[in-house]
Image (cartoon, rainbow, N blue to C red):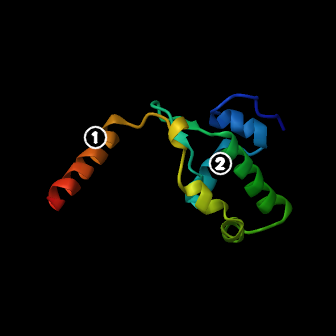
């Protein structure tokens, strides 16, 4: 198992796979099971994991492989630890990746429509 580089902000799925010892297809599957685990994506739609994502993956791996939790049991344990709530918020503002322009314009349009409806 490799270690994460110091000072690096984002890691691609292949790098995370090497660091954690979890195959890329398993990481993608876990994203579907642990919805809040989904990493940010680049403009080219590549998954970009942060250090705290890697730490969460290592915890999930420990729960599933070493402590023999089921997926549902691991989900419950993470909720008990308060991790699922902390991770649901997504990237912090200062590290947030540029979003797709269409999604950004849609969000702005929706916000403007809501303001107009209040007037």
Residue 52 versus residue 57: which sits nearer the camera?
52
Q: Quick one: SS at disc 2?
A: helix
Q: Quick one: SS at disc 1?
A: helix
Q: Is residue 59 left or right of residue 24?
A: right
Q: CA distance from mark 1 to mark 2?
A: 30 Å
Q: Which is closer to the viewer, label 1 or label 2?
A: 1
State the image coordinates of residue 78 (x, y, percent, origin top left).
Answer: 69, 64
Q: Which residue is rendered at x = 33% and y = 41% of the image? A: 104
State the image coordinates of residue 76 (x, y, percent, origin top left).
Answer: 67, 71
Residue linked to disc 2: 27
> Mark 1 near mark 2, Cβ–Cβ under 8 Å?
no
52 is higher (above) or lower (below) than 69: above
- State the mark number for residue 105: 1
Residue 12 versus residue 53: which sits nearer the camera?
53
Crowd class of label 1 (few under 14; some 14 to 19; many from 20; radius 10 Å): few
Return the residue found at the far front. 119
43 is higher (above) or lower (below) than 68: above
């Amino acid at each position: 198992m490799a270690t994460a580089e110091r000072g690096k902000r984002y890691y691609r799925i292949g790098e995370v796979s090497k660091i954690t010892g979890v195959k890329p297809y398993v990481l993608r599957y876990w994203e579907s099971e642990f919805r809040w685990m989904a990493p940010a994506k680049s403009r080219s739609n590549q998954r970009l994991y942060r250090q705290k994502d890697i730490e969460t993956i290592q915890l999930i791996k420990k729960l599933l492989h070493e402590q023999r939790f089921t997926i549902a049991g691991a989900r419950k344990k993470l909720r008990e630890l308060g991790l699922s709530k902390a991770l649901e918020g997504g990237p912090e503002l200062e590290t947030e990746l540029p979003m797709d322009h269409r999604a950004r314009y849609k969000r702005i349009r929706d916000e403007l429509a809501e303001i107009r409806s209040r007037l």
